[in-house]
Image (cartoon, helix red, strand yellow):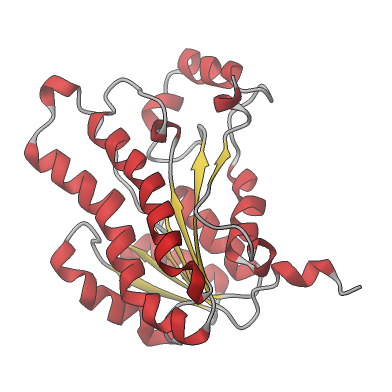
Amino acid sequence: MNDPRALFDLTGRVACVTGASAGLGQQAAITLAAAGARVVGVARRGDALADWAASVGDNAAIVAADLSQRDQITDIAAQIAAPFGAPDIIVHAAGINTREHADDVTPAGWDVTMNLNLAAPFFLSQAFAPAMRAKGWGRIVSFASLQTTRAFPGGISYGASKAGIAQLTRAMAEAWSKDGITANAIGPGFFPTELTGPVFADPARAAANAAQTCIGRNGALRDIDGPLLFLCSNASAYVTGQVLMVDGGFTAK
């Protein structure tokens, strides 16, 4: 029997991780690099990206860019491919939550949310699909949310974008899986990140969220490592079009 650990080895692969300057995106970038991939981190904050890249070394490169600007996606894709070639793996972790009440949602807030959370994952994937197709191998992993299927206060635009991620994942799987490109998503529960800062700033609210899980705690960044590596590697060769909830059983109740 072949060593099953080899299924998770990313040596020789090139990965792109958006939102790599902090939170789950940076954790994803760290994990993929540790598994052997050369990783291009993308985010608006170049200083935070530089700190991450310095910790990884020669197998890391950075692109400081705003993915909410749809007219710049083609140029950003070219910058991503420059250091190591077109990526084999794309992890879409960049996101925004404006937390606007339904009565207060603005066109500007709606547009930036949809552009970053939903449009960028598709158009960036579309940009690299031809290179993946030529290799007969590719992995696209987006970030869904508890709000993919549940409504939360102040989550009109964010929830709509994350519900869209579930269908986008299925649609990309239908379009490209026959070419060896799988498309899946991770649906994280409550993890301590910049995006969930307002939640964890309220101890009672954080405790209530932990109590809602089956495990009895909120997520730690390391909890994303295994599911992410599974979806980005040969271990998930026959898995596509799925949303894997990594939420401690929050949605099981």
Above or below, comparing residue 138 to residue 192 in the picture: below
Q: Is residue 80 left or right of residue 25?
A: left
Res. 74 visible in picture: yes
The percent position of residue 132, horizontal first and vertical second, equals 46, 79
Above or below, comparing residue 95 to residue 233 in the picture: above
The percent position of residue 27, horizontal first and vertical second, equals 54, 54
The percent position of residue 136, horizontal first and vertical second, equals 53, 81
Q: Residue at x 30, y 49 (%)?
A: 117
The percent position of residue 100, horizontal first and vertical second, equals 20, 27
Q: Residue at x 45, y 60 (%)?
A: 173
Q: Residue at x 25, y 56 (%)?
A: 119
Q: Quadrant of the C terminus?
A: top right
Q: Residue at x 60, y 39 (%)?
A: 220
Q: Is residue 109 left or right of residue 12?
A: left
Q: Quadrant of the N terminus?
A: bottom right
Rendering quarter of residue 98: top left
Q: Is residue 18 left or right of residue 69?
A: right
Res. 45 visible in picture: no
List the single residue furthest toward the right: 1
Foreground: 222 or 106? Answer: 106
Q: Is residue 153 left or right of residue 21?
A: left
